[in-house]
Image (cartoon, grey):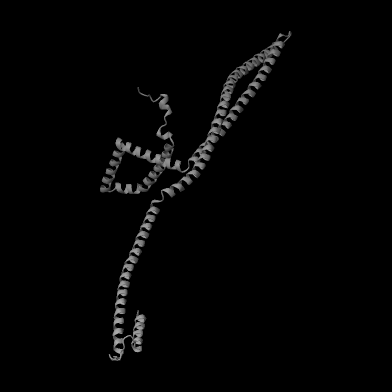
Amino acid sequence: MGISPGSPVMQGLKSFWQRPEGTVGKIALVIACLAAGYGFVQLLPWLIAAATDTLHLVLLIGGILVGVFILTDRRVRTLAKLVFQSAMRYLTGLFIELDPIGILKNYIAEMKKNLAVMDEQLGNLNGSIRTLQNQIDTNQKEAEHSLALANQADKKLAAPGLAPLEQQQFMSAKITNQRHAASLIGINKSLTDLRNKLQILYDQLIRWRATAEFQVTDKENRVSEEEMRRKALKKAYSVFQAAKKIFRGDPVANQIYDQTLEYLANDAGQMLGEMEDFNRLANKLMTNMDLETGAINDEAVKQLNEFQQKLLPAAPSGTVQAGAGSPDVSTAAGRKDDYSDLIR
């Protein structure tokens, strides 16, 4: 089942130009037309000069044909339309994202301005109704006065002994006042009908005005609510962002942090390796030194013993008594033990 353009469903849908991006698109088109006009004025001398030259003229005609093809080709126009609408929708989205509360407040201010205009027009309409009523009252009084004059002229005509000229004058006055009263009564009837219609319209507009004021107040309260909610959410979101930065971290900062830890680990490993290598080398050197020192000590003891033996005089064999210790031998032995203890 098809939907006709005049159906309520289609009437409820807004075209591109009726949506916010359409307004931005109109402004962009006006700016583009102004820029195109300025560019054409700037290129006009060159176009005139190009028309005088054959080669330039051919190029100009070719450019015009390409431009005509672009403008007349449906696919190109559809593509340009889609690109233009997408660009305007993107720009509108950026503006709405930057200041959504400001847009709502501007909308409320525009509604209040229209409400003020409505109040002014209602005042003018009420003034018109009052003016009509005053005119109706004036006409009514004047019509009553004319009828009174006509009745008075009729009484005069009924009086006996009037001259023909007086009868003619009174008759003319009676007819004139009657016509004047009838005219005023007809005007009052039309004005009364108009006043009644305007009064009905005024009463209806007063109800509409109350409804419009309620809508403005309701939207203003909604905007205030959204503003407070947005402020609270922004504060909460700032805390959330800080927590998210702590948990997730900045990718660049995380990379620098990881590289720093890696450098510290490598540097610590390098220093520990160098110290371990030096420790192994030092242990080896100390072991060699201990061995060499022990060998040197043994050699020194041996040499001292030999030197001691050389220093001791040779004792006769017959003079040495068994069991009787020679003091020289004892002294020598004691000296040998002293040297050994000293070296050791």
Q: Please identify the residue farthest to the front as the structure is shown.
A: 322
From this view, report whether residue 234 is shown above or below residue 296: above
Q: How many labels does the image show?
A: 0
The reply to whether residue 280 is visible in this rendering is yes
Which image quadrant for residue 195? top right
Instruction: Name the residue located 41 percent from the left edge and 26 percent from the top edge.
Output: 9
Q: Left or right: 240 with respect to 256?
A: right
The spot of residue 123 in percent (x, y) is 60, 30
Instruction: Name the residue located 35 percent from the left edge and 66 percent from the top edge.
Output: 275
The spot of residue 60 in percent (x, y) is 29, 45
Q: Left or right: 310 with respect to 207?
A: left
From this view, report whether residue 303 is shown above or below residue 80: below
For the C terminus, the image quarter is: bottom left
Q: Which of 72 and 316 is in front in this view?
A: 316
Instruction: Name the residue located 67 percent from the left edge and 17 percent from the top edge.
Output: 144
Q: Left or right: 84 with respect to 59?
A: right
The reply to whether residue 73 is visible in this rendering is no
